[in-house]
Image (cartoon, rainbow, N blue to C red):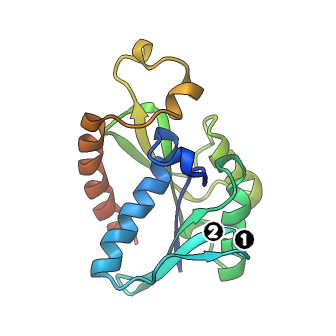
Amino acid sequence: MKLIVGLGNPEKKYDNTRHNIGFMMVDYIYEEWLKKENFDLWGRNKKLLADVSTGTINNEKVMIAKPLPYMNNSGRSVQAMAAYFKVEPKDIYILHDELDLTLGNYKIQVGKSSAGHNGVESLINQLGNNDFTRIRIGIGKEDKEKQGPGVKFVLNRFGIMEKLKLRDVKKKLLQEIKDLI
């Protein structure tokens, strides 16, 4: 089984904020795979501490998930899913925001440190290693001075032009994730 997890914060007030790009990406994957790949409807699983959907991609069982704990504690949910389904870290893919990458860019890496991202740090602590795949989705501005303080910036919503740019990123990432599986 492959586990694809988007990091974000569960409250409505965080919907469509930069910090929730992981949730946004997983929602996009869900919408695409629900139509084309016969995935289950979203379901809340209290034992796994997540909203989940399952299906099959490239003959591989896949679960997509959005953890219910806040991002900084999302490792609890990922660890619960990994333990319950006996998923090895190499089969876990984490999508999250990356302030150090400009909007429209992304990086896919395995076995890296958290680089100060508290959600990723939570996963490393709970899983006991960093052998999972990180899909770092850029949310930063070209001009870092216009960006302002990081904490405030990540909680802002995307503008119209930014949403258009993200549409292309989502399409590219969807294909890359499918290829990784």
Disc 1 versus disc 2: nearer the observer: 2
Q: Is residue 39 above or below residue 82?
A: below
Q: Amino acid at mark 1?
A: Ala
Which element type, helix, strand or loop, lies under badge 2?
Answer: strand
Report whether residue 48 is seen: yes
Quarter in which the C terminus is drawn: bottom left
Q: In the image, what residue occupies the spot 34% across and 70% down?
A: 31
What residue is drawn where x is 26% and y is 55%?
Answer: 172
- Residue density around tag 2, few if under 14, some if 14–19, many if 20 or more, within 10 Å: many
Which picture quadrant has residue 160?
Answer: top left
Local SS, label 1: helix
Which disc is residue 100 wearing? none
**Relative vertical location of residue 59 with respect to residue 157 in this rendering, above or below:** below
Tell me the residue at 39%/70% (across/down): 30
Give 142 or 51, whichever is nearer the viewer: 51
Do the residues under discs 1 and 2 have CB atoms within 8 angstroms? yes
Total numbered badges shown on the rendered structure: 2
Please name whichever residue, 94 or 155, is drawn nearer the observer in this view of the structure.
155
Q: Position of residue 105 (x, y in %)?
A: 33, 39
What amino acid type should be assigned to the residue bearing mark 2? Ala
Name the residue beneath numbered marker 1: 80
